[in-house]
Every structure is written in C-alpha cells, then in structure tokens.
Image (cartoon, rainbow, N blue to C red):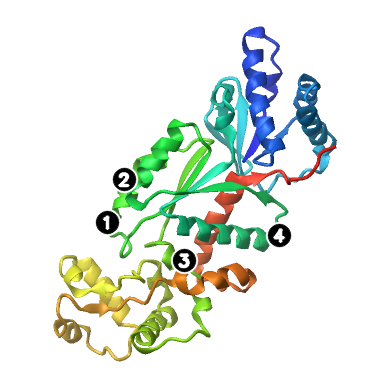
Amino acid sequence: MLFILSDELLATESTVKERINRAIKHIATAVFESKHLLFGSIDVLKHFKKVFRLDADLYNLFNALENNYYTTPIDFITRRIEIVINVITLKRVEENIEIFQASIDEFQESSTCQRTILLGEDLNDCFFYEHVLKWFVENQTFNVNCVFEKDNGGGVNTAKSIKNHLYNKKILLSIIDTDRKYPNSKTGETYDKCAKYINKEKGKFKLLVLNVQEIENLMPFNFLEGKAYFGEHAYKKDKFDLLRQTNPSLLKFFDIKKGIKKGITEEDPQYKEFARRCCACDPNITDFDTYYDSINNDEYVYPPFSRILNIIENDLKERINDIDLLDFQESEWHRIGKNLVNFTCARNNEALN
C-alpha cells in the first residue's frame, strides 16, 4: 500500500503532535520493514526526518525518501491512502488516481499497518491470485515489490473473516466470485453474505467481486493442451473444447466442475436456455428439444470437465509468460492484478544506509 503523508501533519499544536508522531512512527516502521510504500512532499519528509533523527532506521528511511524524491516512480500506483489528522473527504479522484483519506487515529497501534491481508474464499484462490499478480507485473513491466499475507475465508464464512479483519483495523483486500450459473442468474451464498461490504470500501479495505462463476473460469485454458486424457475424462475434455472453440463467452459462467444437470434446469427456464446455447456448440446435438426430452433429471444436459487448477498448477508456476487468455479472462486478470499491486506494493528489502 502507498501511504501519502499530507502537509497538515506539519501541525505543531501539542494536542495532536504526539498522536501524529505515533501514527507516522508505526507507518514508517512498516515501510522500513518492506511491508508498504511511503511518500509525501519534500517539506513533510524533511520534517519527519528531523522528528525521528534519534531513530537510526526511521531517519535513514526518511533521508532516502528525500534523496530519491524526484526519481521515485509512483504513477503506476492508482490507489493511495493520504494520512490526515481528521478525515474530511473519504475519497477523491485526481487524474485517474483514487485517494482515500485516513486519520492518524487509525494508526495509533502498530498492528493496524502490518502487511496487507489477501482474503480469498480458500487458500487455493489466494495462490492463484499470486500467479495473476506475477503475470500482471511482468506484463506491465512494473518494477515493484509486492508483499501480502494469504488468508482462507472458508467459503461461506468469508463474510465473518471480513468482519473480523475490519474489527481489528487490518489492511484488507478480499476477492470473491459471484457463483452465477449464467448471466443475470441469482448469486451464490458466499456473495450474498459478503455483498453488504461492497459499499463499505475505504482506504484500508476493498471487496473485489469477480464477474465470473468462480475462479475455475479464469484459468488459462491453453495449459490444458498437450496433456493426456483417457476414457470419460477425454470425452469431457472434447465437450469442453467445443465450448471453448465455438462460443468461448459461455465459459464465463459455465460450471466447469459440476456441469449442467437437467433437474436444475427444470426449475429455472433461463438456465435451460443457457444449456441450449451450450448444446448448440456440439454438432452431434442437432435438435436440442428432442435431446433434452430423452435424458433423465439426474443426467447432464452438458457434462462438466474437471477441476482445472489441479491439472495446470505446475504450468502456472513455470509458464507465466506463455499464458493465452480469453477476452473476459484478460479483463478480470487485469482487475485482479491492478488491485493487488495497489494493495500490496512495498519497499524493496534493501539496506538504506
């Protein structure tokens, strides 16, 4: 996270000076420990270099920030926290950069500015987002160090985890998906429980909602090629490829792990129409209605494929520059990467003196 020290922190009134210095000490210490980034005007950097002149670590930090003031690139960080005495404007936008104000009172304890927490619905999600971040940074050719702590939301318990982290005033980026089975379908239980936090965004917190069924729909499908598939798995792979080759936009919401069972579509006419669009990709299904009437409620209208992450996990680690994304995937990868850079950017772990 990039913290901007406002010039109002130069205030000399004794009633606030102690609170200011305590907050900046905690933030600056976290930056010194390579957990975040720090910036401010030349005047404010010089001021705090003087304030902390007896603390070798913080003195060296502010001295380095002052010396590198004109050569430190921060333009690529499009979301920042401005430290003020009292919040007047929670959020403003300047030249496409979001600036959130945060009061010094939010940082009176060192625990409130430790490394950013990345909260996913489970840890596998967090590991996947880490790969997305690496891809994004390399794709954008950013020179940035990113640091964060992964946390497992526990699926439907993710909302409870968000509540707990906010209560403890942590820096938190939580990412969830919608669990929609088709465009405009009802959302899943995890989303419904977390939805109340979408409009509670502030400098230290954001809930990012991915506009896909689940993260399985964001996997780079080109990594599936060149692998061996046998029997039923080979059949399911062929059916999956028909969607991918004929109408890839369907894969934004198609349930890759569970497929589409007739019984569920009987209860939801719109889901049945989505199934019809999927079946239109299969040249062997020439008459959908006849085909649909011929299968039982516990049979698949369109079969699932597999848990793709299990198949391509090693490829994500080793072939980050060989990723070929569908249009909707690339858009979501950019959203994830951009938010992760904004929330997890940190000072390079190198000596300052």
How many numbered circles does the render carry?
4
Q: Earlier in the sequence, mark 1 or mark 3?
A: 1
State the CA–CA distance, disc 1 to disc 2: 13 Å
Residue pointed to by mark 2:
193
**Which one is nearer the viewer's eye here, 342 or 353?**
353
Query: Against 97, is 298 above or below?
Result: below
- Give the quadrant of the C terminus: top right
Residue 208 at x, y percent in the picture? 46, 49
Residue located 41% across and 36% down the image: 164
The residue lying toward the viewer, choosing from 353 and 37, is 353
Q: Amino acid at mark 3?
A: Leu
Disc 2 + disc 3, Cβ < 8 Å: no
Along the polypeptide, which appears first: circle 2 or circle 3? 2
155 sits to left or right of 292: right
Marks 1,3: beta carbons within 8 A: no
Mark 4: secondary structure = loop
x then y, percent, for residue 8 = 67, 20
Residue 240 image offset from top left, x and y in percent: 38, 80
The circle on residue 218 is 3
Q: Could you tell me the amino acid type at mark 4?
A: Thr
The residue that mark 4 highlights is 141
Dot 1 crowding, Cα within 10 Å, few <14, some 14–19, many 20+: few
Q: Earlier in the sequence, mark 4 or mark 2?
A: 4
Q: Which comes sooner in the sequence, label 3 or label 4? A: 4
